[in-house]
Image (cartoon, grey):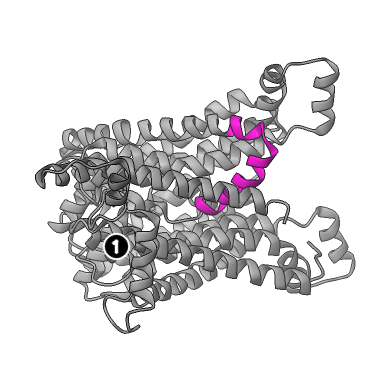
Amino acid sequence: MSGGLVLAALVVWAGGWWMNARLARMRARPGLGLAAPVVFGVTVLLMWELVVRGLNVPGAILPPPSAIGSAFVVNGGTLWEDFVQTFLKGALSGYAIGCGLAFLVALAVDRSGFLKRGLLPIGNFVAALPIIGMAPIFVMWFGFGWQSKAAVVAVMCFFPMLVNTVQGLAAADRMQADLMRTYAASPWQTLAKLKLPAAGPFIFNGLKICTTLALIGAIVAEFFGSPTLGMGFRISTQVGRLALDVVWAVILVAALAGSAFYGLVTLLERAATFWHPSQRGR
Amino acid sequence: MRSLIPILTILAAIVAIWYAGAVALNADWARQQAERQERVLTFSELVAETWSQDRPRLPAPHQVAVELWDTTVEQRITSRRSLIHHGWITLSVTLAGFAFGAALGIALAIGIVYNRAMDMSVMPWVIASQTIPILAIAPMIIVVLNSVGMQGFIPKAIIATYLSFFPVTVGMVKGLRAPTQMQLDQMKTWNASGLQGFLRLRLPSSMPYLFTSLKIAIAASLVGTIVGELPTGAVAGLGARLLAGSYYGQTVQIWSALFAAAALAAVLILAVGAVEKFTMRRMGFTR
């Protein structure tokens, strides 16, 4: 019985491999780009299910996808409340504050070559530091609620966004800047008509990096203290109870939220920087 | 050198803001203490008080510096109070995870570049997984591996590996695809074998991309290690110092652990940068 399931997993793997090899040899056609990853994903899920059931892996180590799915449905209400607490309140507000502040500071920094030369290396350096370690300090300062998570997220988003925006604002050509000058454009006009559009791809790059950071920051900050709800709180408590199907359901929520957030920013990017070479020819 | 003065100016500004912030955040506590002892603080007394509390809301820079000095130079390296001891634990896991992650990332990238089926099916998932907060499953990995009898080094190294292999894969795929069609055709006219094409053209031209992503990967590996040290009553490492500090309200300890982690990150990134410079020079890039 159990051996059969493992064997079935191997068959599924071979089948998935064969299908993707076939797909790879086919000529490009609309929808084909989507088919291969879907086949791969379904293959992985099926193999996971079959191997876990076949080898009788205890649910406390790795639950099968079906159990995760049912935990997702059964705990829907709790998961939604966790989502609201962590993502909508903590991550999104922190993201808005951090990115907004970084944008404004970048506008100010761009006016001064002195500040730019000083801030860019420091910003690049700080962006690589384990800022997530600030979480216990912010929990101490702002309490267990979502405010402390928003603060962690804001600080985490600030530096990548700052560095990207400052680089973007410097991206406009010298020639183009000179042209604006010959038009007698005011600094504000230069900013609105030349520098901001030219900075678009860089700004959106920063915004995209920050979507991932925001979710990570909000979840990890809850490991240091949170009210009795939130995705990080749910993960740490359910891990303690070895209810791993619920933990995986939370991870599913995080994955869906993270992908949707990233996708939304990508759509905005396409709408705002449609003229850029990286967005054309698709 | 041109940017040295601006950098130093901004660093000085940060330290000044920090001292001012320490006064603002710690003033309440200092005033309460003074009220209890029924004395009124003058401004200079208030400032002195706020910069020398035992458990301040925000320790002043010199307090952190003293704590760093005490826990590195003044302690024996083997002592549990030594920051070098904890730092070494974190560093060893980071390096192991980074080495595995880089190797895995490069292998996966080669597979993706040379196998179209893998490119079409795996690559979208590698990119999609970037949008998932991988750190969130760190506690689960630790607990699960703990229940099958693995403790300490290996679970943390797995998390570090997991975090560091994505940037390497993405960067390396870009790098291995960097040669132009002209260059690939040229290799063909020279009758180069597939292996020669890889070793002489694709691999060398991927180096700048590889090192850029290695710098990201080693920073990610460090973050993964620190977060991996948090759950299950972590006992050793910089992450454990952070958690213990937050449990007992030892703010100075938190800040010194943070600075140690930052210094570690800086040293690791600089080390990768030095290897990059050396490799680039040997390869004839003059950058």
- Which quadrant, please, contains the C terminus of chain A? top right
Residue B188 shown left or right of residue A108 in the figure:
right
Residue B15 in picture, x, y percent from top left:
46, 50
Is residue A44 positioned above or below A256 on the image? below
The answer to if B239 sits in the magenta stretch is no
The residue drawn where x is 35% and y is 39% is A151
The quarter holding residue A116 reads top right
Dot 1 alpha-carbon crowd within 10 angstroms: few under 14, some 14 to 19, many 20 or more: many
Along the line of sight, which residue is nearer the eye, A150 or B190? Answer: A150
> Which chain hosts label 1?
B
A67 relative position to B224: left or right: left
The residue under label 1 is which amino acid type? Gln
Residue A113 part of the magenta segment: yes
Look at the magenta stretch and give its main secondary structure. helix
Q: Is residue B198 above or below residue A203?
A: below
In the rendered image of this protein, does residue A95 appear above or below residue A160?
above
Q: Residue at x 31, y 51 (%)?
A: B48
Relative depth, front residue between A249 and B231: B231
Residue at which label 1 appears: B253
Identify the magenta region. A106-126
Image position of B111 with respect to A127: above or below = below
Nearer to the camera, A207 or A141: A141
Q: From where the camera sits, is residue B120 visible?
A: no
- Image position of A28 (left or right of A267): right
Q: How far across and down, in percent of the image, does residue A226 sit?
A: 20, 44
- Residue B171's quadrant in the figure? bottom right
Mark 1 residue element: helix
Task: Where is residue B240? Give x, y as percent.
Answer: 27, 65
